[in-house]
Amino acid sequence: MKRALLLVFCALMSVQMFSQNDLPNELFPTLAGLQRTVCSEYVDCKENKTYLMHADEIKEINGKLYAKYGGVFLREENSKVLIYSFPYEKDFVLYDWTLEIGDSLQNLGIDPYSFPELQYTAVVDYVAYEEYDEFGNRTIVKKPLGKKRVKDISTMRFLDGHEYKAWLFGYDWEIGDYYVEGIGNVGKYAGEYVKLAHPFDVPTCYYGERLVCVSRDGVLIYQMDDAEMDSLNTECLCDGGVGSTVEIIDSPINSFYKTLHEGQLWIQHEDKTYNVMGMEVK
């Protein structure tokens, strides 16, 4: 009995210790040390807001450890990032680094109407919104979100000198989003690592979440153009972020240069040039 109590006490102390320090790599191989600077972009109605996103707490749910990221809880298993749904009391797959072309991933959303008592984000597989009849009676309507399909798989080279596997998700009628292994969403309006469908009313002047930069363990992986940062009045808050327009990037692979060319950030390595999306510029 005393041995069992000691083990429980040690486990609780471990959770407390992890919540105050970096995440353990063995439990969170991609989330540990990952930082993303995000800029909420508005036009005219309010100023843009820049903030740093990273996992900052560990919580045990049903005997498993989750990293708190904003208002949601994530864990990693078998090359997947799983997100916990309190309404369903189960995990959904947020990222799957093993998918092939043609595979699908469930679209996810939040439901603030059906679960107002929850302390955390209510992750669901539908979008909920309000409707009113002619007498003013309110009804909550739920619409299934369906799935997104892998359209293409490629590789992208970023500022740290490494090539990352990239999945292009979307539907046949749209370009879709790029998910990059271990990094998350990348692209113009892909600031959120946890990209959920928000059923809230937002100002028409709200454009979206812009990804400013990404780093892991203090090493810069991605950063938007300096000119674009100036236009948004934002900055990179990640450890390892840089602000100069021309510099050498310290990476495991030598001779990487970050240059600003006609307002665009280019990465030069040996005889090739890449844009910030990791695609070669001819």
Image (cartoon, rainbow, N blue to C red):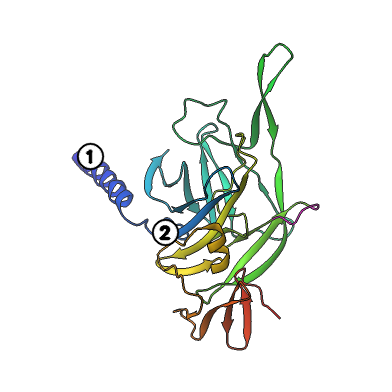
For residue 45, what is the image quadrant? Answer: top right
Q: In the image as oriented, which residue stretches furthest toward the top? A: 135
Q: Image height check: is 21 above or below 3? A: below
> Tag 1: Cα neighbours inside 10 Å, few (<14), some, or many (≥20)?
few
Task: Name which residue lies at 19% across and 39% down.
Answer: 2
Residue 249 percent across, percent down from the top left: 47, 78
Q: Amino acid at mark 1?
A: Leu
Q: Quadrant for the N terminus, please.
A: top left
Q: Which range is magenta?
A: 172-176
Q: Image height check: is 246 above or below 76? A: below
Residue 79 visible in the snapshot? no
Residue 158 visible in the snapshot? yes
The residue indicated by pointer 2 is 32
- Determine whether the residue tagged by mark 1 lies in a helix, strand or loop: helix
The residue indicated by pointer 1 is 5
Q: CA distance from mark 2 to mark 1?
A: 29 Å
Q: In the image as oriented, which residue stretches furthest toward the left? A: 2
Task: Name which residue lies at 77% across and 53% down.
Answer: 174
Front residue (pair 127, 94): 127
Q: Quadrant for the C terminus, please.
A: bottom right
Residue 179 percent across, percent down from the top left: 61, 59
Is residue 58 on the magenta stretch?
no
- Would you say the residues marked 2 and 1 are in contact, meaning their CB atoms lie under 8 Å apart? no
Residue 199 percent across, percent down from the top left: 62, 35
Looking at marks 2 and 1 on the same chain, the residue that comes earlier in the sequence is marked by 1
Q: Image height check: is 199 above or below 225? A: above
Is residue 173 on the magenta stretch?
yes
Task: Name which residue lies at 40% across and 67% down.
Answer: 218
Residue 99 is labelled as none
